[in-house]
Amino acid sequence: MSLNLADLFEAAADAVPDRAAIVCGDVRRTYAELDAAANRLAHHLIGAGVGPGDHVGMYMRNSTEFVEALLACLKIRAVPVNINYRYVDAELTYLFGNAELVAVVADGEFAAITAAVLPNTPTVRHVVTIGAAADVDWGTVTAVDFHEAVAAQSADRDFPQRSNDDLFIIYTGGTTGMPKGVIWRHEDFFHAALTGGNPFGEPYSGPEAVAAAVPHIPEMTWMLTAPLIHGAALYSLFTAFCVGATHVLMPKFDAREALALVERERVMTLTVVGDAMARPLADAIAEHGSEYDLSSLMVVGSGGALFSKSVRDQLVAYLPQLTVRDGFGASESGVDGNLEIGADGLMRIAAKPTVRVVDERMRPIEPGSDEVGYIARSGHVPLGYWGDPEKTAATFPVVDGERMSILGDMGRMEADGSIVLLGRGSMCINTGGEKVFPEEVEMAIKSHPAVLDALVAGVDDERYGQRVGAVVQPRDGHDVPDLDALIEHVTTQVARYKAPRTMVVVDAIVRSPAGKADYRWAKATLQEQATGL
């Protein structure tokens, strides 16, 4: 039974060859066309000396070429490695070296910075560029234009047999330190990140099951607003392939353009990353929704960052047909479940056999107790972090012969097995002995009509050890309330000790290209103001 990602894609491509697979701007690829294009690039990579197990960097914005390169690597059992296009020289040098890249596929706009870091990353021996890179000095590294590289290559699928043990690596920046490469086996990735490839029923057993099912699944269109360098976006892409769906990619997120694409492509499911994308989307619907036919849109989902209740309510108020889904998970664990916000304002994950709460000794906490612990996933989990045994041991401990994924998210398990999510333990603020999780305070702040986005972090305090601080981005045309007024608003939803005692107003909250919070920046911004007081 093969659960290799390339085998699964090829099964879908053979079953629905004429169905649209990818739409990006004015470029469209059917499943057959995407498969052939990926085969051509795969043959080029083989000719350039890339083989099974070799790591190939994906340094691109969203494009059809990104997807072709991703599939090309998987077809020849090479390992695609996502590269955040906002990284600076030092971060790129670290990632290229840590990942031991042998080749890089890069957008032309990133050619110069790629060439600049190559002298310090000697494992890279070949670069494929998309777009102009004529004036770049590549030194001893071979470089070729993407479309020239594939022009004379075969579209045949004459590749060696693949394995469920082939690797897939996702680099994640997280909130602290340099990026870390999460190592997945294809089989584990299929079950944990794609939830078995079938959102409508039981997990697929292999390519034969995909081939049998896909022709009978009604054609549907999904849209990604987030970059493919983000784990949750890759989960969505490969799940779409398993059900023969069309995926619309946005090279750069623009809320109003997203509405136009929903109308043009009859998008059914739209994926964002938290409020950073969902709030501008909701505002665009409020202002321009009547200009577009949005009747096809049935689901708006988020992965990698949480919706606030205020944004959820906005979206459903504007489009009553919508189902809003908040996926809980990470690059290190896949999709752990969907979050629901109860009438009590608490975020809960439904009971799931592979997700539980453990104490500091990694022992399960009894359901129904009030004890707070770490949310842990077992079963199909990653092997670890590439080249970092110390962090691997901390995040993926093996307890009684079972590997678990423990990211530091805190929660408590209720009697029915559901889990109340409290927040990331490493970000927890200890103010006078009281524990404050930033997420719940952020949700309260973002419910204020003048606030577009907010991050909460601890600020050093002589009396209390830490005090709660908030970095706030106002909506266009609105003035953020003063600190006293914000405290009064927040304390209608959370206890007064959780309210921010320091506030900094900024033009824009700093987040990753995928919308993930940069808590290092938030803490430094707050601390800088506190130091200057």
Image (cartoon, rainbow, N blue to C red):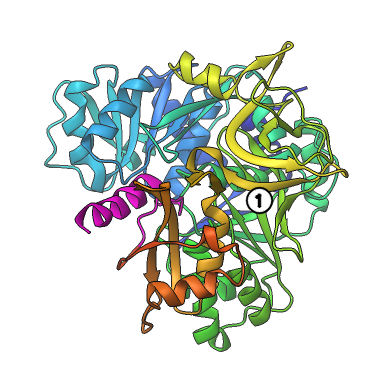
Q: Secondary structure at mark 1?
A: strand
Look at the image and give the residue range highlighted in magenta.
Answer: 509-533
Position of 299 compared to 223: left or right?
A: right
Does the rendering let one see residue 371? yes
Name the quadrant of the N terminus: top right
Residue, disc 1: 327
Residue 344 belongs to magenta span = no
Q: Nearer the viewer, residue 46 or 356?
A: 356
Q: Nearer the viewer, residue 443 or 102?
A: 443
Residue at figure coordinates x 58%, y 71% from the top left = 262
Above or below residue 149? Residue 389 is above
Residue at figure coordinates x 65%, y 74% from the top left = 313
Name the quadrant of the C terminus: bottom left
Above or below residue 282? Residue 413 is above
Position of 209 compared to 304: left or right?
A: right
Q: Position of residue 23 (x, y in %)?
A: 52, 58
Position of 512 compared to 157: left or right?
A: left
Q: Position of residue 368 (x, y in %)?
A: 84, 41
